[in-house]
Image (spheres, rainbow, N blue to C red):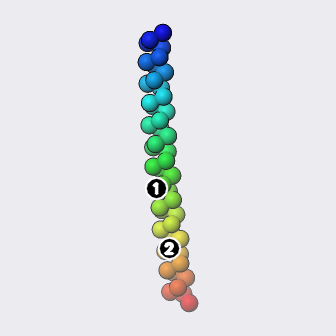
Amino acid sequence: ETSLNMATSQENNEINNITLAEKDLISSVDEVMNSIENDASAIKNLAT
């Protein structure tokens, strides 16, 4: 039972690490999207 609990704890740690990595990835994508939107606005301003 102890080894089972340890395995479950390890799995939970791995899941938490994956969740953190996903959040980091989402943040990075959001930053890229914001950058693209800013670039698009700048290009629009140049065009007018």
Q: Is residue 16 above or below residue 4?
A: below
Of residue 30 and residue 13, the one placed in the foreground of this image is 13
Secondary-structure class at tag 2: helix
Sequence order check, earlier mark of 1 and 2:
1
The C terminus: image quadrant: bottom right
Residue 38: image location, x then y, percent: 50, 73
Q: Is residue 22 above or below residue 10?
A: below
Label at residue 7: none
The answer for how far apart the CA atoms under marks 1 and 2 are is 15 Å
Look at label 1 and name its amino acid: Ser
Q: Which residue is mark 2?
A: 38
Residue 33: image location, x then y, percent: 52, 63
Task: Name, please, the residue furthest toward the bottom.
Answer: 48
Q: Residue at 52% of width from left, 85% of height from top?
A: 45
Residue 16: image location, x then y, percent: 47, 35
Label at residue 28: 1
Q: Residue at 50% of width from left, 40% of height from top?
A: 19
Secondary-structure class at tag 1: helix
Look at label 2 and name its amino acid: Asn
Q: Is residue 6 above or below residue 34?
A: above
